[in-house]
């Protein structure tokens, strides 16, 4: 029995080097994202059917002498080490070991975080997760079944889950941390507004890039993200029929808008604050509409809310910009009564014209350098303001 155990162990160890040509495939982190799945699959060192047949024959002899437990123990130990080595050789351990994901999110908050660093790590994780969940774990399950099925007591299932359990958890730590904590990082991001002209903030671009990157792998992540987001802003979410992944996306967008609202207070002019929100929420809408998959995930109900947010910001901008001008065009105080007749007061008329010109120049001076990047949105904004200002001015001018 001792000789058989040793033979089983020796043969198993010999077949438990994950990649025969791993050095040429994953020599550095950057190579992982660009390497095709097929290259990893071809290099993957899975035991042959002949080897599995031989190991099962040894396991049968050990089982007949009531030593199957020792055989299973050896198998679990060797194959767990195999998957640990696999994760290490794929350079994934750096994503989760030592709490690095928390450091990433912390530095993101403090504006020391580089988006490209996170982007590369997400791409690597997706690559490795797809390989593991779609191929390697499935193959390991087949190995366990071929070796131990029929021996009773669920030996093959026990082996499989214990072998891949730690590796699975390590893979999920990264995605769960990013999806359950990324919302908090976005909400607490404190970078100032660098461009004071109402342009789209860099945070908005980074967050939407993050979402766009994740949605490319929605099939995999929909199954892996099984936790509900922290619904502190649940009154703004329609939970019905949405996946956990969709809820995380929506919550990220919700907290992004809350963060942007806080950032807008850095701007001195009220109209500029509304313009800033209009540009940023419109950018969010554009990025969602660019992706059919993301548009489907977000859903019509929340998209309608985003459309309303853009329209509300535009309306608030118009009101704050036009009201002072419109008040100068009012007829109040323009007429005087003299000898039972009513006529225009020239002093009041001169004062009104002076006020209109002054307000117009103030608006022009303030807003000449303000930005609306989207030409369609800019044309809508201009048209709606012309519809408000021109009739009021013409009416005032007709009274002269």
Image: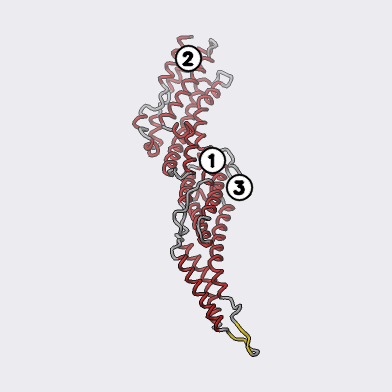
Reading the image, the residue beneath label 2 is 58
Rendered location of residue 388, percent (x, y):
54, 71
Q: Extreme front residue here? A: 347
All told, the count of numbered labels is 3
Q: Look at the numbered disc 3 and give the secondary structure of its residue.
A: loop
Foreground label between 2 and 3: 3
Residue depicted at 51% across the width and 12% down the height: 62
Left or right of residue 228, residue 284 in this image: left
Q: CA distance from mark 1 to mark 2?
A: 48 Å
Residue depicted at 59% across the width and 45% down the height: 242
Rendered location of residue 88, percent (x, y):
42, 29
Q: CA distance from mark 1 to mark 3?
A: 14 Å
Packing grade of label 2 (10 A; few <14, some 14-19, many >=20) is many
Q: Extreme bottom residue here? A: 339
Reading the image, the residue beneath label 1 is 181
- Which numbered disc, 2 or 3, marks the residue that appears first in the sequence? 2
Q: Look at the numbered disc 1 and give the secondary structure of its residue.
A: helix
- Which numbered disc, 1 or 2, marks the residue that appears first in the sequence? 2
Reading the image, the residue beneath label 3 is 233
Q: Which mark is drawn over residue 109?
A: none
Report the front residue among 194 and 141. Answer: 194
Report the front residue among 61 and 21. Answer: 21
Where 51 falls versus 259 (above or below)? above
Residue depicted at 53% across the width and 60% down the height: 274
Quarter of the image with the C terminus in it: bottom right
Packing grade of label 1 (10 A; few <14, some 14-19, many >=20) is some
Where 312 falls versus 57 (above or below)? below
Q: Extreme right residue here? A: 340
């Amino acid at each position: 029995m001792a000789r058989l155990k040793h033979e089983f162990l020796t043969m198993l160890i010999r077949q438990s080097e994950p990649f025969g040509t791993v050095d040429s495939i994953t020599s550095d982190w950057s190579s992982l994202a660009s390497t095709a799945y097929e290259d990893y699959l071809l290099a993957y060192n899975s035991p042959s059917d002949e080897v599995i047949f031989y190991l099962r024959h040894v396991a049968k002899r050990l089982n007949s002498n009531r030593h199957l437990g020792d055989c299973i123990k050896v198998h679990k130990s060797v194959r767990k080490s195999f998957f640990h080595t696999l994760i290490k050789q794929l350079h994934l351990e750096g994503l989760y070991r030592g709490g690095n994901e928390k450091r990433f999110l912390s530095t993101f908050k403090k504006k020391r975080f580089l988006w490209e660093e996170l982007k590369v790590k997400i791409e690597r994780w997706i690559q490795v997760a797809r390989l593991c969940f779609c191929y390697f774990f499935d193959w390991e399950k087949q190995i366990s079944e071929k070796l131990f099925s029929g021996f009773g007591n669920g030996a093959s299932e026990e082996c499989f889950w214990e072998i891949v359990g730690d590796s699975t958890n390590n893979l999920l730590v990264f995605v769960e941390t990013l999806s359950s904590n990324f919302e908090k990082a976005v909400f607490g991001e404190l970078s100032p507004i660098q461009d004071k002209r109402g342009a789209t903030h860099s945070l908005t671009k980074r967050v939407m890039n993050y979402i766009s990157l994740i949605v490319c792998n929605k099939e995999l992540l929909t199954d892996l993200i099984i936790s509900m987001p922290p619904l502190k802003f649940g009154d703004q979410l329609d939970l019905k029929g949405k996946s956990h992944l969709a809820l995380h996306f929506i919550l990220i967008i919700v907290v992004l808008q809350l963060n942007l609202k806080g950032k807008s207070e850095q701007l001195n002019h009220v109209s500029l604050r509304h313009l800033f929100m209009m540009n940023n929420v419109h950018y969010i809408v554009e990025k969602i509409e660019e992706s059919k998959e993301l548009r489907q995930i977000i859903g019509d109900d929340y998209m309608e809310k985003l459309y309303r947010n853009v329209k509300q910001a535009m309306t608030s901008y118009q009101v704050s910009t036009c009201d002072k001008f419109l008040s100068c065009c009012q007829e109040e105080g323009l007429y005087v009564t003299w000898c039972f007749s009513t006529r225009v007061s020239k002093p009041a008329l001169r004062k009104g014209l002076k006020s209109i010109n002054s307000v117009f120049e103030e608006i022009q001076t303030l807003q000449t350098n303000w930005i609306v990047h989207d030409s369609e949105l800019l044309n809508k904004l201009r048209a709606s303001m012309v519809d408000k200002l021109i009739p009021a001015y013409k009416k005032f001018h007709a009274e002269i």
